[in-house]
């Protein structure tokens, strides 16, 4: 079964007339409908990347296993925590401020 697709959308970038407009727009934030955090992008149903990943993991686990709702949520939480930690670790490793890029 194919995983649910996440379609991210950015804030609209029209009507910029000066460099300060660009800075103001880059500071514009959206709110995730799930966690209520301020984020730069949400998907078509209003979820940030993190919440979308958690919901996708939970849906896939429920559809592909015989786990109870609580077990599926617990497993999705573990996978979610692991994958976000790995993404953050790799971003930190690739940041020029860290001095080196690990391969």
Image (spheres, rainbow, N blue to C red):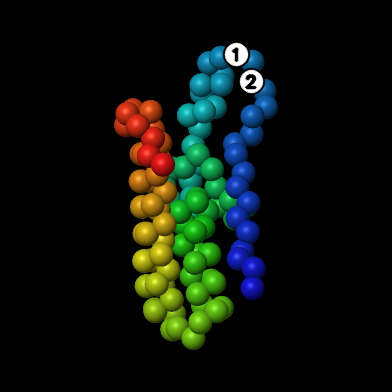
Q: Which mark is residue 51?
A: none
- Residue underneath mark 2: 16
Q: Which mark is residue 18?
A: 1
The local secondary structure at tag 2 comes to: loop
In percent of width and height, residue 75 lies at 39, 72
Count of numbered marks: 2
In the picture, which quadrant includes the C terminus? top left
Instruction: Tell which residue pokes out farthest to the right in this image.
Output: 14
**Residue drawn at (59%, 36%), measured in percent from left and top?**
11
Can you say whether 5 is above or below 91 in the image? below
Name of the residue lying farthest toward the bottom: 66
Residue visible at 48% across and 46% down? 31
Q: Residue furthest left?
A: 98
As drawn, the residue found furthest toward the top would be: 18
Horizontal side of residue 79 vs 30, given as left or right? left
Q: Nearer the viewer, residue 50 or 78?
A: 78
Residue at position x 49%, y 67% in the image: 57
Query: Which percent across, then down, holds residue 61?
Result: 50, 74
Seen from the viewer's position, the closer of residues 98 and 3 is: 98
Q: Is residue 93 left or right of residue 20?
A: left
Is residue 19 shown above or below 33? above
Looking at the picture, how far across and down is residue 10, in whole percent? 60, 39
Q: Secondary structure at mark 1?
A: loop
Q: Which one is in front, 72 or 22? A: 72
Q: Residues within 10 Å of mark 2 (few under 14, many from 20)?
A: few
Q: Are marks 2 and 1 in contact (CB under 8 Å)?
A: yes
Q: Position of residue 74 (x, y in %)?
A: 37, 72
């Amino acid at each position: 079964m194919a995983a649910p697709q996440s379609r991210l959308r950015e804030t609209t970038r029209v009507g910029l007339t000066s460099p300060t407009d660009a800075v103001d727009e880059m500071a514009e934030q959206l709110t995730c409908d799930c966690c209520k955090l301020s984020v730069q992008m949400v998907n078509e149903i209003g979820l940030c990347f993190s919440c979308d990943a958690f919901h996708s993991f939970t849906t896939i686990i429920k559809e592909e296993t015989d786990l109870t709702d609580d077990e599926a949520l617990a497993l999705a939480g573990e996978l979610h925590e692991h994958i976000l930690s790995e993404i953050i670790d790799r971003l930190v490793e690739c940041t020029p401020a860290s001095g080196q890029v690990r391969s």
